[in-house]
Amino acid sequence: MKKALIAGLFAFIVGWSSAAVPSYAEENSNTGGLSQGELAPSARSAILLDADTGTIIYEKNSHDKLPPASITKIMTMLLTMEAIDEGRLKLTDKVRTSEYAASMGGSQIFLEPGEEMTVEEMLKGIAMASGNDASVAMAEKIAGTEEAFVKLMNEKAAELGMKDTHFVNCNGLPADNHYTSAHDIALMSRELLKYEGITKYTGAYQDYLRKDTPKPFWLVNTNKLVRFYTGADGLKTGYTSEAKFCLSATAKRDGLRTIAVVMGAPDTKTRNNEVSRLFDYAFSQYAMHSIYKPGEVLGVLKVQKGSVPEITIQADKEYNVLVKKNAKTEDIRHELQWTEGLKAPVAAGQVIGKLSVYQGDALVKEFELTSPVEVKKAGFWKLFKRTTGKLFHVD
């Protein structure tokens, strides 16, 4: 108990002293005139993007393959949230700690061999305290062994297009051939944020594990920006002597959610300061411009030989583009293009068109449009009635 409380207190004190960094807007109110090279001058690599559209606002050596330290745990949390979403796990399920999981060094929540915690408690331990032991326990719960889980991690990385990445473990402890890039971290961070419930854990500043037991453990988030930067609610810090200080962070203001990744910063204060600069730049210079809101009708598409003659396509989400705040929004236009001569059968989710957004003559963003329903091929009798109905229809 004493060791656990001292570890929690140490994390709190270090975070407090290093996180109270000045806002970049306070340092330089003229962010619009800022050279992008100055956004993350001390980082080995960095990237800033809009989480909604994936538009990259800034990048620096973003494809360099580097050790990610505990930022690795974003993939561990992603596979955990995916399992919960698919019904393979429940937040209330018990997770037993193996001897191997309990043996992990570095950041930990001091799990004992045989100790059980719920999936939700393990998520807190991973997201807030960066527990290496909790990460391995969750890996074993999902895949049986850490080795099998790492295979799932690499498969998911390939699925997401993370071409600069190879995982060797689930927690980021130093290992040969374990690497990723700022670009790939942004990709998996964006995917994790699709599970809205994750910020309940990544955005919490403090909590407890084993609260009503003789061994309470005080959790203090290793990402101090969730307390000191308005709108920040995640995601994951990382540090090893090889990786230096790393952070994948997210913040949301006025409908704009950004992801900022900094790798290889020399210390915690610099890391937090440079992520804050990236956020300040995004929020001061960019805004979301709405093209379609959920439920708005995009078009009505005829389906040849379908069980229904046409389908109505509605926006299933916000269709937005990222624009500079001083941009003339009247220059933004969009075009809808549908599959010509669409014939049944049509599968639900089948791509049937695209939405192209332009600013002047420049293509800003393209969205694939999919069928909201399955349309089976109509039988002979239905097609016959439809044809004869048209022949004898009188206005």
Image (spheres, rainbow, N blue to C red):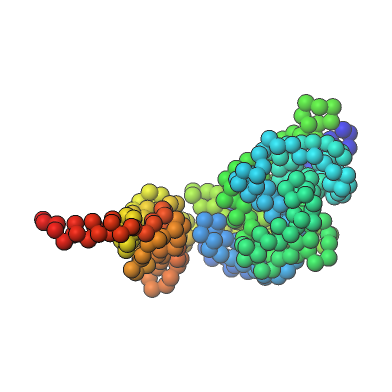
Asked if 298 appears above or below 6 in the picture, the reply is: below
Q: Is residue 371 visible?
A: yes
Q: Foreground: 30 or 355?
A: 355
Q: Which quadrant of the view contains residue 8? A: top right
Q: Foreground: 270 or 241?
A: 241
Q: Is residue 83 left or right of residue 54?
A: right
**Residue ID at (62%, 63%):** 159
Asked if 106 appears above or below 243 in the picture, the reply is: above
Most extreme residue toward the front is 381
Q: Foreground: 117 or 389?
A: 389
Counting from the top left corner in percent of width and height, residue 256 is at 51, 52
> Which quadrant does the C terminus fall into?
bottom left
**Residue ID at (37%, 62%):** 344
Counting from the top left corner in percent of width and height, residue 177 is at 80, 67
Counting from the top left corner in percent of width and height, residue 332 is at 37, 64
Q: Is residue 176 left or right of residue 236?
A: right
